[in-house]
């Protein structure tokens, strides 16, 4: 089945799907996006993702390209036309096309693009069983990381450094030596005392939908956690480390920079929480 993309009202063959050269997303990264997982035909946390998309648009005063309900119908159609049963849907909204000039253009119409791709649960499962390595990098981003903007250059550079060092992800560290989040994931530790910790949400990190869903599951199960920033030292000394995201779900980390975490195998709490999240997605 060939891939199909949705571009401003049209379903086009992926290879021929294009936007105008003066789209402000292209010229100024003046746009926002969402990535939503689909697992065995079921969209995971659709409402959370769409709430966050609308919040991002509102924060940047980008007009909604269409109402929520029709947008959901386009999502369904993109999934259907791409035959995605397990995978990811990508939604991007930009401020639209206008002669290049920094201020918001009068009368520009928001652009809406959607694509979908298949992913493999088996591959994800294998990665989780093995665990992955992360590196740490300075967080050089702007101060509104809560907005899911397509302006991702620091994240791209961080991930590239991770790849070059044979790691899966880069955890970013702020000026105070505190871990903010991964380049496209949220960071969690189980510290030396056995306390489960992930950073509180504010302007410094993206409020991950997977993070929020897992926190809710923890509450339901009566598993305690702390919402606070942890330091790079705490990360290195942690008993367990894992990360969460829409594409990685709950992914155990077994190495941070040159330091093995625990005994170099995915930790028991990380494995348990991956299982808890998997059950949540599958039911
Ligand atoms: N932080 C950043 C910077 C991200 O790009 C992502 C991926 N969207 C996440 C965290 C994880 O968020 P989610 O669980 O909603 O995918």
Image (tube, helix red, strand yellow):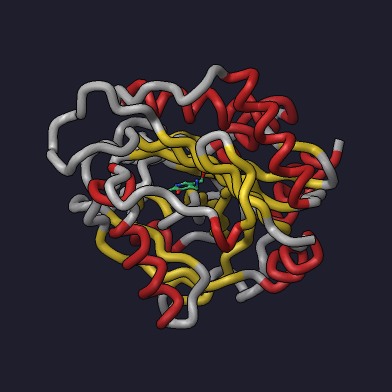
Displayed quadrant of residue 122 = bottom right
Judging depth in this view, the residue of 137 and 257 nearest the camera is 137
Horizontal and vertical percent position of residue 73: 69, 27
Displayed quadrant of residue 196 = top right
Residue 66 visible to the viewer:
yes
* Residue for point 70% across, 73% down: 130
Q: Is residue 186 shown above or below 123? A: above
* Residue for point 30% across, 65% down: 137
Judging depth in this view, the residue of 136 and 233 nearest the camera is 136
Displayed quadrant of residue 229 = top left
* Residue for point 60% across, 58% down: 14
Horizontal and vertical percent position of residue 36: 62, 41
Residue 80 lies left or right of residue 89; in this view the side is right
Residue 275 lies left or right of residue 255; in this view the side is right
Q: Is residue 217 shown above or below 87? A: above
Q: Is residue 178 shown above or below 144? A: below
Q: Is residue 137 shown above or below 282? A: below
Q: Please give the count of numbered marks on the rendered protein.
A: 0
* Residue for point 30% across, 56% down: 173
Judging depth in this view, the residue of 227 and 22 nearest the camera is 22
């Amino acid at each position: 089945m060939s891939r199909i993309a949705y571009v401003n009202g049209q379903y086009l063959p992926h290879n021929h799907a294009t936007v105008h050269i003066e789209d402000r997303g292209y010229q100024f990264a003046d746009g926002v996006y969402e990535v939503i997982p689909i697992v065995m035909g079921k969209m995971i946390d659709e409402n959370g993702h769409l709430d966050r998309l609308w919040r991002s648009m509102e924060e940047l005063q980008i007009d909604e390209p269409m109402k929520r309900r029709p947008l959901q119908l386009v999502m369904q159609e993109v999934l259907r036309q791409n035959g995605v049963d397990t995978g990811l849907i990508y939604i991007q909204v930009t401020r639209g096309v206008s002669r290049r000039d920094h201020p918001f253009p009068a009368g520009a119409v928001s652009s809406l693009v959607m694509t979908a791709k298949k992913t493999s649960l088996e591959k994800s499962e294998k990665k989780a069983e093995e665990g992955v390595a992360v590196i740490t990098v300075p967080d050089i981003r702007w101060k509104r990381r809560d907005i899911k903007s397509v302006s991702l250059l620091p994240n791209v550079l961080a991930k590239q450094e991770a790849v070059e060092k044979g790691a899966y992800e880069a955890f970013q560290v702020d000026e105070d030596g505190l871990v903010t989040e991964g380049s496209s994931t949220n960071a969690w530790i189980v510290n030396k005392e056995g306390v489960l910790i992930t950073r509180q949400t504010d302007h410094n990190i993206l409020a991950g939908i997977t993070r929020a869903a897992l926190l809710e599951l923890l509450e339901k199960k009566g598993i305690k956690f702390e919402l606070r920033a942890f330091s790079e030292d705490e990360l290195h000394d942690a008993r367990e480390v894992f990360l969460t995201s829409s594409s990685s779900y709950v992914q155990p980390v077994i190495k941070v920079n040159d330091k093995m975490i625990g005994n170099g195998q995915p930790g028991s709490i990380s494995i348990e929480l991956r299982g808890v999240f998997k059950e949540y997605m599958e039911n």
